[in-house]
Image (cartoon, rainbow, N blue to C red):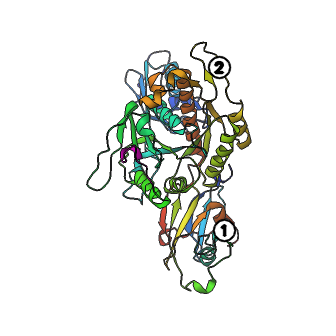
Amino acid sequence: MSSVMLSPKKFFRTPDGKLGVEWADSSRECVDLIKLRLACPCALCVDENTGERIVKREQIPENLKLESLLSVGRYAVGFIWSDGHKTGIYPYPLLKELTKTP
Amino acid sequence: MARSSLKYSNFDIMTEEQILKALEAVMDPDLNRNIVELGFVQNLVIGEDNSVSMELVLTTPACPIRDRFKEQCERIILALGASSAEVTLSAKAGRVSMPEVSESFLNDVTHIVAVASGKGGVGKSTVTANLAVALSLSGARVGILDADIYGPSMGVMFGIDQAPAVYEDKTISPVLARGGISIVSMSMFSDSDRATIWRGPMASQMIKNFLHRVRWGTLDYLLVDFPPGTGDIQLTLTQECPLSGAVVVTTPQEVALADCRKGLSMFDSVGVPVLGVVENMSYFICDKCQKEHYIFPQGGGERISKTFGVPLLGKIPMEAALASCGDQGIPGVLYNPNSVSAEVFTQVASEAVRKISVFAAMASESLSTFRYTFEELPEESL
């Protein structure tokens, strides 16, 4: 039962505007917001059949802001962006992968 | 708080600190910490006559060892020289919080527990109904959400013939059924002979209504009777509410076990801890000779339990005397509490309750349900 214990204890903002996560094992990591947005796993951002990434850097507004974040069950977090995009569900293992390198 | 005065007895002064220190000897075997450290001991009062009263606030009213705790505490307090010891038991309520879903009534539900299997016909609903009654008999407040939209069975299982009350704000009350169980089921809304023919999104919407628009009230456990499979409804359930754990039901045959594995892996991928496996229809108890007949191959539940590292919570026999209970609207545990099945269900319930407490303690530091704006997050460096 691997993913059970991979969960966040706390979210925070880093001084340079990144999203910080404190994980259950007390490790503290962060991720750049644009990188986070580009990694969105939803069907609008990734082709369902080929797995090809549809969302491009150029399509994302320069001043993109993260509006809010909310839990999805016990396994994932959803993000709502200032450009209205809100369909991405990031399972904690994916978020962990993203926060490993800011 | 009253302090003991100096007494001219064998025991001179008994202070609150002394009592607390002594009570540290009482360990919770599941959480591996003592009851003082866990904050269970509250409202400790030492009277003028050296009588001691205290409250034991447990994590669940269904705590299987609550009487042992009570007895141990009383013995320790008396041994310290108290003239009398009075220990009252109570339970903490409401841990699951969903602050942002304002219209949700799940706020006062402490634990939401899935009863599921990959396969149909293994007896999920029978297990759900009997676990609910067993938990209720042990003192917990219990509800059942029948999430099987297409083949609801809770109506028949509990002999429910009334519709739930509907309020002006389009919320409903669950029906209070036998054994004190609050139930909501699709069977209350549809004609039993007519099929509900819906596509996924409609079924999912109904599930959301069942979760958030039902006035569940204060419950210790809300059991969710999952429909078979790993599709739309199951995904909605795992996304819409923080499940405390899942009980996976199987039968001994290999074909059921294969689907059971899928059920287990589904909960694994959505971060819901599996409390254990229940093997239903394990053997048949002959009503004439009382002999146990193993109709299906043995050891299936054990194999699953070993492979996936989840406990086997119990093996439910088939008993002729109980076979028609579900159809009559009285769950077996209520109909014949002395039967072998009832005994196993009671064991499964108390084992599940222990597991829930353990997992809750393990995850106590993790965020369960949250909704933040990015702006309101605290600014911190790594």
Where is residue B275? Give x, y as percent: 60, 41
Residue placed most toward the observer, B288 or B299: B288
**Amino acid beneath label 1:** Thr
* Residue that label 1 marks: A99
Residue placed most toward the observer, B134 or B367: B134
* Residue that label 2 marks: B292
Q: Secondary structure at mark 1?
A: helix
Where is residue B285? Give x, y as percent: 60, 20
The residue drawn where x is 62% and y is 52% is B266
Residue B1 appearing in the image: no
Q: Residue furthest front?
A: B193
Where is residue B320? Give x, y as percent: 54, 22
**Amino acid beneath label 2:** Glu
Q: Main secondary structure of the magenta part?
A: loop
Residue B280 appearing in the image: yes
Q: Secondary structure at mark 2?
A: strand
Which quadrant would the C terminus of chain A be assigned to in this image?
bottom right
Query: Does label 1 lie on the same chain as label 2?
Result: no
The residue drawn where x is 66% and y is 21% is B293
Q: Is residue B297 left or right of residue B324?
A: right
Residue placed most toward the observer, B195 or B292: B195
- Residue extent of the magenta highlight: B186-197
The residue drawn where x is 44% and y is 39% is B154
Q: Is residue B188 magenta?
A: yes
